[in-house]
Image (cartoon, rainbow, N blue to C red):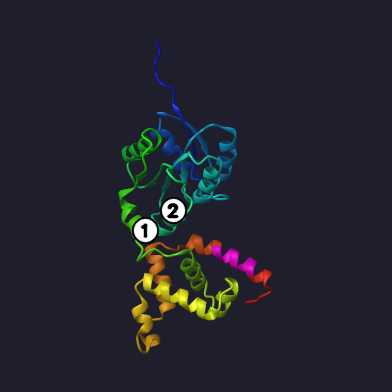
Amino acid sequence: MNTALPKLPVIIAEDSARDREFLDSILSDYELTLVADGEQVADLIKQRDTQCIISDIQMPKLNGIELAKIVWALKPDTRIVFWSHYKDEIYLRSLSQIIPPDTVYGYILKDNTSEIINKAVHQVFHESQCWIDPKIRSVQARGQRTTDNITDAEYEVLIDIALGLTDNVIAQRHYLSRRGVQSRLKLLYQKLNIERFHNMENTCEVMNPRSRAVAIAFQRGLINSEEIRCEEQRLKKWLSHEHISV
């Protein structure tokens, strides 16, 4: 008599065929449904009782963060393992803002061995425990410290200076006074530990604080080229709506 337990159904969202094949080969203990983008998962999750998802972060049409937001809004108990090449702070920051209370999830980098990937997946799906890749725990901890944590308001102004906007345009975009913009910038400089350059005499001869803030943000992974590409599209729409030409 066969007493083997049924395999746990898992949906995998991954746009890379090579990575899908890899997961398919190492996760033989699960009943896998493989799809190439987040939109397909969003449709499937409405039709099935599947409570387990493995999702890439960067995908066309709907990325992993956007997918998780949709899934958790529908089914907050869904366990999601994010696997990615990226350990950028921007993704951990985005995740922290959408994870429902008491929800179990995982975050693992793609450069791990199949053994570690299986361990992470098992811990999240079978043991109902969060699993965060050791390589990104320091990044996660930094984002949680009050002295380093960038607020949404400060993050908005960081994106704006990365896009090259002036104080006046930033003020118009976020319904602020020019003084309000400068106050946010000052707080941002403090969080990025560059306020000392901003307060130095002859600052322009040493370092431009706006450029330095953008440079540090890229180094920390607070922004990246993909995020700036998306923000460029949002900016174009806003400029068009406001009838501002550049």
- Residue 96 shows which numbered tag? 2
Name the quadrant of the N terminus.
Answer: top left
Q: Is residue 232 magenta?
A: yes
In percent of the image, x 55 and y 61: which residue is there? 230
Residue type at the position of mark 1? Gln
Whether residue 107 is visible: yes
Query: For the residue carrying disc 2, how many other residues have a C-alpha within 10 Å: few (<14), some (14-19), or many (20+)?
Result: few
Residue type at the position of mark 2? Ser
In percent of the image, x 41 and y 67: which residue is there? 217
Query: For the residue carrying disc 1, how many other residues have a C-alpha within 10 Å: few (<14), some (14-19), or many (20+)?
Result: some
Q: Position of residue 233 (x, y in %)?
A: 59, 64
- Residue 3 shows which numbered tag? none
Q: In the visual, does 61 lie left or right of 11?
A: right
In percent of the image, x 32 and y 42: which residue is there? 113
Q: Secondary structure at mark 1?
A: helix
Q: In the visual, does 137 lie left or right of 243?
A: left
The answer to the question of whether label 2 and label 1 lie on touching residues, with beta carbons closer than 8 A, is yes
Q: Position of residue 154 (x, y in %)?
A: 46, 68
Mark 2 or mark 1, earlier in chain: 2
Write down the residue under mark 1: 144
Looking at the magenta stretch, what is its main secondary structure?
Answer: helix
Q: Is residue 31 above or below residue 226?
A: above
The magenta segment: 231-238
Name the quadrant of the C terminus.
Answer: bottom right
Q: In which quarter of the view is residue 121 placed? A: top left
Q: Is residue 77 magenta?
A: no
Q: Position of residue 12 (x, y in %)?
A: 48, 39
Q: Secondary structure at mark 2?
A: helix
Closer to us: 188 or 208: 188
